[in-house]
Image: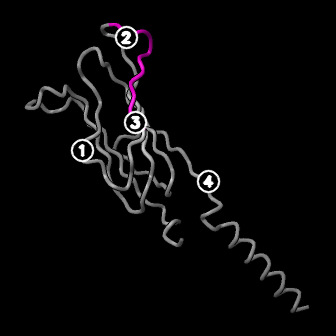
Amino acid sequence: MKMIKYWFIACVCSFAALFMHPSHLSAQDHTLSWADNGKAILVRLKDTITINLRGNATTGYIWDVVNPIPSKVQLVERAYAPYRTLVAGGGGVYTFKFLVVSTGSCELIFTHGRPWEKKIPPMETFRVVIEDDGIMHHC
C-alpha cells in the first residue's frame, strides 16, 4: 500500500514538473493604456507589450519613447492611427509594441510633446516598469 502511495506521489510530482516547465508557457501580449501609467507589469521572455496612448498628431504633439530603449525589450512596431480621417483637430492612438528579449527589470518612458521644442518640457509623461516574473531564470 505504501508503494502505491509513493508511486502516486511521484507521478503527480513528475506531471506537475512537466506542466510547470517554462517551455510549455506561451507568450502573452500585455496591452497597456494611460490608465496603466506608473504601474509595474510582470512579463516573461518572448512576451509582447503593447502600449496605446491617445494623442493628436495634427497639433504637432506626439508620443515618443525616451531613448535609449532598455535592452530588455525590442521595439517592433510604432504607429499612429487616427480615429477618423486625418483632419486638423482630429485625435487618434499612438501604438508602441515591444518584444521582451532578455530577463531583468527596466522602465519604459514616453513623452508627449513637440519634438522641435527642445527647451519646453513634455506636456505629459507615461511610465511603466517592466519586471521579470522569474520563471525564465530556471531555463
Residue at image coords 38%, 30%: 53
Spatial CA span between label 1 and label 3: 14 Å
- The residue beneath circle 1 is 67
Q: Name the residue under label 2.
A: 86
Residue on which the image places disc 3: 96
Q: Give amino acid for label 4.
A: Ser
Q: Is residue 35 above or below residue 137?
A: above
User: Farthest residue toward the right?
Assistant: 1
The 10 Å Cα crowd at callout 4, few under 14, some 14 to 19, many 20 or more, is: few
Provide the residue designation for mark 4.
26
Report if residue 18 lies within the magenta region: no
The circle on residue 17 is none
Q: Position of residue 65 (x, y in %)?
A: 29, 39
At 32% across and 51% down in the image, what residue appears? 107
- The answer to whether the residue labelled 1 contacts the one labelled 3, judged by CB atoms less than 8 Å apart, is no
The image position of residue 72, as x and y in percent, is 37, 56
Q: Which of marks 1 and 3 is nearer the N terminus?
A: 1
